[in-house]
Amino acid sequence: MLSITSGALHKYLKAEGELPEEALTCGCPIDVRKEGEKGTGGNVIGFMGVNLCTEHEDPYERFKAVHKAALDAKAHAQASDVRTNMEIIDTVPGGIMTAAMRVTTAMGINATPFNTMLTNVPGPANQLFFAGAQVVEGFGIGPLVPGVGLFHTASSSVMNKEGKINLSFWACRDMLPNPEFYLQCIEESFIELQAAAKPAVKPKKPRRRPRKSS
């Protein structure tokens, strides 16, 4: 999903003439529960930043670079005390935090170190029904914050006895004025990544017919 998002952003920004030389960064929510807290309700979430490697033109090279960046980000998040940082932030009243983010954004300062967000939302493992009607599709949305006007959600589910994962996005019209084109970029990014992942088919060597002995 990160690689598809990276390819889509590369295509969209390049077409708009806005592709930066430096790679974009994606914020990914991660569960920071301790061992004794697993299975409990509520959210205990931190964030890790993943380099999207949007400077790569080739989809396969971009995929390898994003994969390495994701592994590095996970290792860094596990080694650092992400939970302590989140607990410190949680002590700040929500109104003050919101006002501070708006002020920094108005001053041209991006208080969020990410260009976009992507979260994974595991869905139900069984077919769902509502008032007798079979649920056939599901997708998620995420909050937009000052400085980050594009949020992606990867939602997995089992519908009609088939495993499925949907990649949806929620965007600010001022920051991403052409969402229809971005949707097209996502689809094209998936198709080219799928093609790049297929192994090259080597041509079969012609079989030599055995010579008849005289």
Image (cartoon, helix red, strand yellow):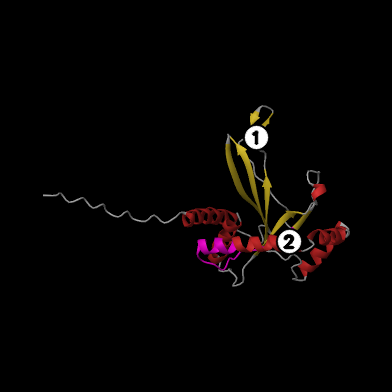
Q: Amino acid at mark 1?
A: Asn
136 or 106: nearer the viewer = 136
Residue indicated by mark 2: 77
198 or 101: nearer the viewer = 198
CA gap between label 2 and label 1 equals 32 Å
Q: Could you tell whether 98 is left or right of 169 in the image?
A: right
Q: Secondary structure at mark 2?
A: helix
Q: Secondary structure at mark 1?
A: loop
Start-end of magenta stretch: 47-66
> Does residue 201 appear anywhere in the picture?
yes
Q: Earlier in the sequence, mark 2 or mark 1?
A: 2
Decide whether residue 7 is among the magenta residues: no
- How packed mark 2 is, by other alpha carbons closer than 10 Å (few <14, some 14-19, many 20 or more), is some
Residue indicated by mark 1: 126
Q: Amino acid at mark 2?
A: Ala
> Does residue 49 appear anywhere in the picture?
no
Where the N terminus falls, by quadrant? bottom right
Q: Note whether 137 is above or below 25 in the view shown.
A: above
204 or 150: nearer the viewer = 204
